Image (spheres, rainbow, N blue to C red):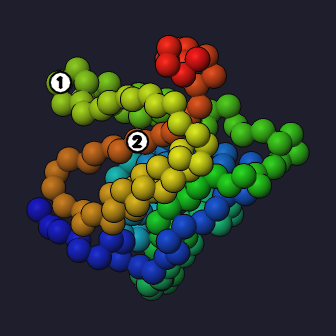
Amino acid sequence: MSINSSVPDYDLADTIELTTVEQVRAISDPLRTTILGLLHERAATVTELSIAVKRPKSTVAHHVKVLTDAGILQVVRTRRVRAIEERFYGRAARMFYVGLGRQGQDGQLPHDFNDFEVAADESKSAYEAGQMRSFIRHARIPEERAAEFWQEVDRVIHAFDQLPRSGDTTYGFTVGLYPILDYPTLPPAEDER
């Protein structure tokens, strides 16, 4: 078991705002999300990525190109192998977030862009094995407090992203904050009426 203390092993921006539907579509594919996750650990070649995900090299090369064209991946170094220059790809940022300015031709996000759906699918076996750690809470708070709270969550997300990679198990970490339009609320207390 090796420990990589510099996560990842190349320079990258802290955050990048995704502002186009094409960028959001690029990260909404499960294989591309997996590739991005692997590159949190270190830069890798298409060959290394294809071995890791057990998919044909041509398939992985296609997905790497989509991510690179969207500005989400970048070539971080190269090396000469025989007569060919091998490229090592890395993330352009530790974290990507969908910005408010995202507008495509139709102005809509892809229908499959839902991290909770991905997390639910990934977590089934952990749930069945009794290894699932999760919770859900609800709070009626003003929008400003929700924004402040999300800043705190963002710090935890960054801390998780920067953990040294080691061990034999990969853990998923999913968070979300969303308005619920039809959640019941209590009427004002008797003394507030």
Q: Which residue is mark 2?
A: 174
* Residues packed near mark 1 inside 10 Å, few (<14), some (14 to 19) or many (20 plus): few
Q: Secondary structure at mark 2?
A: loop
Foreground of the two, 28 or 43: 28
> Outermost residue, left direction?
1
- Measured as percent of width and height from the top left, residue 165 is found at 24, 63
Which residue is depicted at the point 20% across and 47% down?
169
Quadrant of res 143:
top right
Residue 68 bears which disc, if any? Answer: none
Which numbered mark, 2 or 1, is in the foreground of this view? 2
Q: Secondary structure at mark 1?
A: loop
- Measured as percent of width and height from the top left, residue 34 is found at 44, 49
Q: Is residue 68 visible?
A: no
Which amino acid, by three-letter code, is at mark 2? Answer: Thr
Do residues under tags 2 and 1 come within 8 Å of each other at their CB atoms? Answer: no
- Measured as percent of width and height from the top left, residue 129 is found at 17, 24
- Measured as percent of width and height from the top left, residue 188 is found at 55, 18
Is residue 122 toward the left or the right of residue 108 in the image? left
Q: Which residue is mark 1?
A: 129
Foreground of the two, 183 or 21: 183
Which residue is depicted at the point 81% across and 49% down?
103
Q: Which quadrant does the N terminus fall into?
A: bottom left
